Amino acid sequence: MTMFFTTIILIFVALVLFADFGGLCNRESETWSRRCVNDGQCRDHCINNDRGVDGNCGGGYPWYRGCFCFFAC
């Protein structure tokens, strides 16, 4: 009985470590050409223009923030 539970746990751990659960990858929008200050506008732009599933403003410097879109990996 213990061997059965150990096997189940090992299978579960393997699935968690090696399975791709539909993660999202992000990249900067190819069609956004201005500084990003509104996450809602960026999200709408990514969904409607870049065929992404989500989007938000991001970047390293406060004076330049780009619109980053999220896509299925």
Image: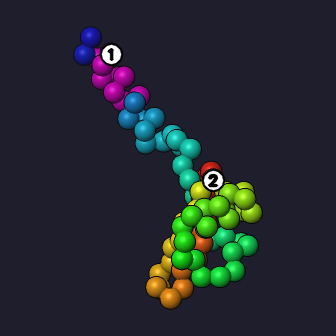
> Which of the 4 quarters of the picture holds residue 52?
bottom right
Tell me the distance, in whole angstroms, between the alpha carbons under discs 2 and 1. 41 Å
> Which of the 4 quarters of the picture holds residue 10?
top left
Vertical relation: 63 (above or below) 73: below
Residue 13 is situated, as x and y percent measured from the top left of the image, at 38, 35
Q: Of 53 and 73, which appears nearest the observer?
A: 53
> Which of the 4 quarters of the picture holds residue 41?
bottom right
How crowded pointer 2 is (Cα within 10 Å; few <14, some 14-19, many 20+) is rated as some
Residue bounds of the magenta highlight? 3-11
Q: Per the image, is 7 magenta?
A: yes
Q: Residue at x 57, y 64 (%)?
A: 40
Residue position for label 1: 4
List the single residue furthest toward the left: 2
Q: Of 21 and 67, which appears nearest the observer?
A: 67
Q: Look at label 2 and name its amino acid.
A: Val
Residue position for label 2: 53
**Residue 27: in sight, yes or no?**
no
Q: Of 4 and 25, which appears nearest the observer?
A: 25
Left or right of 30 in this view: 7: left
Q: Per the image, is 26 magenta?
A: no
